Amino acid sequence: MTTAYLADALAPRVGEFIRLRRDLHAHPELAFEEHRTAALVAEKLRDWGYAVTTGIGGTGVVGQLRRGNGPHAIGLRADMDALPILEQGQSPWKSRVEGRMHACGHDGHTAILLAAAQAIAEDLAFSGTLNLIFQPAEEGAGGACRMIEDGLFERFPCDAVFALHNMPGIEAGHWVFRSGPTMASSDDVTITLTGQGGHGAMPHRAVDTVVAAASIVMALQTVVSRNVDPLQTAVVTVGALNAGQANNVIPEHATLALSVRALDPQVRVQLKERIHALVAQQAASFGVKSEVDWRPGYAVLVNSEPETVRASRVASALFGPEKVVSQGAPLTASEDFAFMLERVPGSYFFVGNGGPGTPGACMVHNPAYDFNDQLIEPAARFWMALVKEYLV
């Protein structure tokens, strides 16, 4: 199977899947609301001969294709959900749903996997089992966990699982892989302070939560700089501080909202312990009561080395080593594919959406973002080659 063969198999289909991607973009659906998208995916897969199971983890879809007597199984995952963002673009396929848009390229990821699915079903010989996993609710709602809890890997066993994500700022069609910790854990934290309200002119008769909150914000900056090993990566961001409404009123309550991230599970534990202790001690020093609501989010995403090396070699063979970074830098963004990788070895990697100065360089989660349709053909070709690599 040559690169030319793969390209020839996909070439007549590319326009169809660009149109499909733009249709998905125009009809974005939020987490666990991907009913239209899931129905479209299921219909296409059935038409191409896949055994289709719907409703996994809510709106998840799995298409399975078995051929020959090969003992191995591979899973390829695409995410389907959109974001609650008002789109600024003016393309003909702009979102038709006010306040919702595909601002992260999940429409493109779905179109890529569908393009590969059709070409694999019609043109690719292999022996084994292919599981195509179309996941809902990646954007913070934990759709991967819901699918796993619904028996994903018991019902569709996989020897390895893979997922890709477009990445603005990287030249279109260039690939970045990484073995080991690749994306950070993400925990949401709310700190509530309770003091005694009072008149701004008489602070001695109040217990000021604003001063305590300000002190806590500054003290939190020392967690990463003075408690975490300098060779480790950690982030403690105070994204919101809310207290009071008038300049002459000392508020009884103040709240802080934090995003806490780490690339090592032990550092994640250390951050939690240190933040709890620091908040309690700082609050007590001001006579303020404190409460910390810690909501665990996504786990550290850890790519297994054998699968990552294998995928990187496939990309190098297809596109040339000059377009492939085999050990890129880690990211402090988070991804719930991490939970799938806790159950099955595999790899999560990136394909460039467009370099600096191009429309594809607009960062994800930006209201002006759009997926680069030129990625559909090469990325689908990669999926085809990876399946052939595993299911010989």
Image (spheres, rainbow, N blue to C red):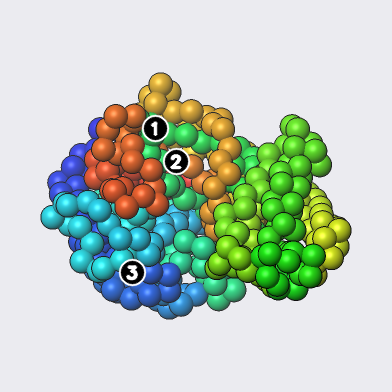
Q: Residue 196's x, y, as percent?
A: 75, 73
Please tell me whether residue 14 is drawn above or below residue 130 in the rendered image.
above
In space, the residues marked 1 and 2 are separated at their CA atoms by 9 Å
Earlier-in-chain disc, 3 versus 1 = 3
| Closest to the observer, 157 or 41 | 41
Instruction: Estimate the spatial distance between the alpha carbons at disc 3 and disc 1, rounded to whole Å.
Output: 27 Å
Residue drawn 55% across the image and 68% down it: 245
**Residues packed near mark 1 inside 10 Å, few (<14), some (14 to 19) or many (20 plus):** some
73 shown above or below 84: above
Residue at (27% x, 43% y) in the render: 372
* Residue 88 in sight here: yes
Which residue is the site of mark 1?
Answer: 170
Residue named by callout 2: 350
Binning the other alpha carbons within 10 Å of mark 3 as few (below 14), some (14 to 19) or many (20 upward) gives many
Q: CA distance from mark 3 to mark 2?
A: 23 Å
Q: Which residue is mark 3?
A: 29
